[in-house]
Amino acid sequence: QKEVEQNSGPLSVPEGAIASLNCTYSDRGSQSFFWYRQYSGKSPELIMSIYSNGDKEDGRFTAQLNKASQYVSLLIRDSQPSDSATYLCAVNPGYSSASKIIFGSGTRLSIRP
Amino acid sequence: NAGVTQTPKFQVLKTGQSMTLQCAQDMNHNSMYWYRQDPGMGLRLIYYSASEGTTDKGEVPNGYNVSRLNKREFSLRLESAAPSQTSVYFCASSDYTGTDTQYFGPGTRLTVL
């Protein structure tokens, strides 16, 4: 079992709708959770980080964390064509002080006009 | 601030050749990382350096060596390149202030023939 799992997609969502991206992780002791966005041919950039159970909102983005279910998600409201990218879920297992983050393989999101 | 810079941006090698990928950050971060990204595989950690003077293996270290030259610079060396090392290489840095956020360089596209 991979340590961080994501559906590879592509996930196709109409413009203006809500895009929902999901991620599960295997290490119950994980402390920190991140969503990175990566445009084709570019480097990953951080969108959201979340550390405690519940929701965290930042503009059109909401990260949701459920540690009991080992599940983290990203909701994108009012999806725009510029949101079309690959979204990487990343988890810090918490067993190393060196912040060794583990990345999922990413979900490709396509926003259709 | 330039953030994280990498050189070169592109490189083509023949099997058996050697080369060094350079990475520098100007954010005064303690930790630096080298990842490779292959289609459908996400980001895989090659080596990391938690602080100046220390380096540790990641998930896929075979065929690579690293040097943490000083706090700013972290280089990755391929001693004898193989076609399996064809990939996009990303350098990243972070400072463990409780957020673990990693900042990525623009990447190096390496092809080994």
Image (tube, coloured by chain):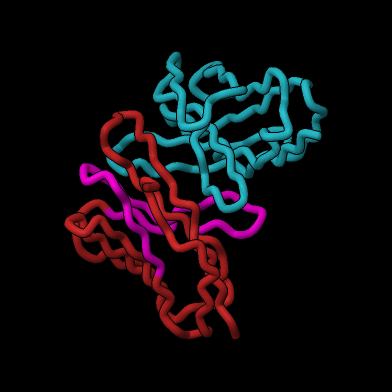
Chain colours: A red, B cyan
Left or right: residue A97 versus residue B51 is left
Q: Position of residue A40 (x, y in %)?
A: 64, 58
Viewer-side residue, B11 vs A27: A27
Q: Main secondary structure of the magenta part?
A: strand
Q: Quadrant of residue A49?
A: bottom left
Q: Position of residue B23 (x, y in %)?
A: 60, 30
Left or right: residue B52 versus residue B96 is right
Q: Is residue A44 above or below residue B46?
A: below
Instruction: Identify which residue is drawn at 68% across, 34% down.
Output: B84
- Residue A29 painted magenta: yes
In the rendered image, the quadrant that contains the C terminus of chain B is top right
Q: What are the residue bounds of the magenta stretch?
A: A21-50
Left or right: residue B72 versus residue B102 is right
Viewer-side residue, B4 vs A36: A36
Left or right: residue B74 versus residue A56 is right
Instruction: Identify which residue is drawn at 54% across, 48% down.
Output: B41
- Residue B37 painted magenta: no
